[in-house]
Amino acid sequence: MPKTLESPKPPTADEIAELADRGEDISRFFARKGKMMPPIQRVNVDFAAGMLKELDDAARELNISRQAVIKSLLRQALDQQRMARKMR
């Protein structure tokens, strides 16, 4: 059976990281279509036990982390607030 020509597999993230560690140019692996995200700033927030239980219940139901629930709910609240301000 004749061999088919296969396109070469793209390198894995680990392989690209190794190239970068060796000082090689890795720009060819990126399409430059993304945007730079600002650095994430860690914050501490205190929650009452009841609210933590609600967050944990929601996380379990959605099969995501507590942190993801908090971020999602906060994002929704901020979006609603911004929309309300635009309507004024």
Image (cartoon, rainbow, N blue to C red):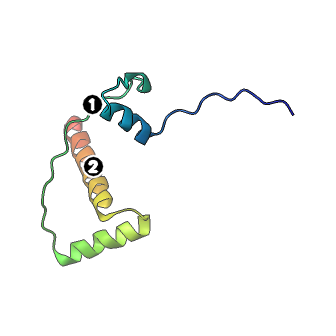
Identity of the residue drawn at 42% across and 64% down: 62
Indicate the secondary structure of the residue bearing disc 2: helix
Pick the quarter of the image with the C terminus.
top left
Q: Left of 65 or right of it: where is 49?
A: left
For badge 2, the amino acid type reads Arg
**Residue 6 occupies which quadrant of the picture?**
top right
The tally of labels here is 2
What percent of the width, then of the height, locates residue 63? 43, 65
**Structural crowding at the residue carrying mark 1, measured as other residues with C-alpha within 10 Å and reported as few (<14), some (14–19) or many (≥20):** few
In terms of depth relative to the viewer, which is nearer, 2 or 75? 2
**Residue 29 occupies which quadrant of the picture?**
top left
Separation of marks 2 and 1 at Cα, in angstroms: 20 Å
Identity of the residue drawn at 33% across and 32% down: 20
Specify the farthest residue to the front.
22
In terms of depth relative to the viewer, which is nearer, 51 or 80? 51
**Residue 83 occupies which quadrant of the picture?**
top left
In terms of depth relative to the viewer, which is nearer, 7 or 34? 7
What percent of the width, then of the height, locates residue 49? 19, 77
Identity of the residue drawn at 22% across and 41% down: 82
Pointer 2 or 1: first along the chain: 1
Indicate the secondary structure of the residue bearing disc 1: loop
Q: Which residue carries the number 1 mark?
A: 36
Which mark is in front, 2 or 1?
Answer: 1
Q: Which residue carries the number 2 mark?
A: 75
For badge 1, the amino acid type reads Met
Pick the quarter of the image with the N terminus.
top right
What percent of the width, then of the height, locates residue 16? 40, 34
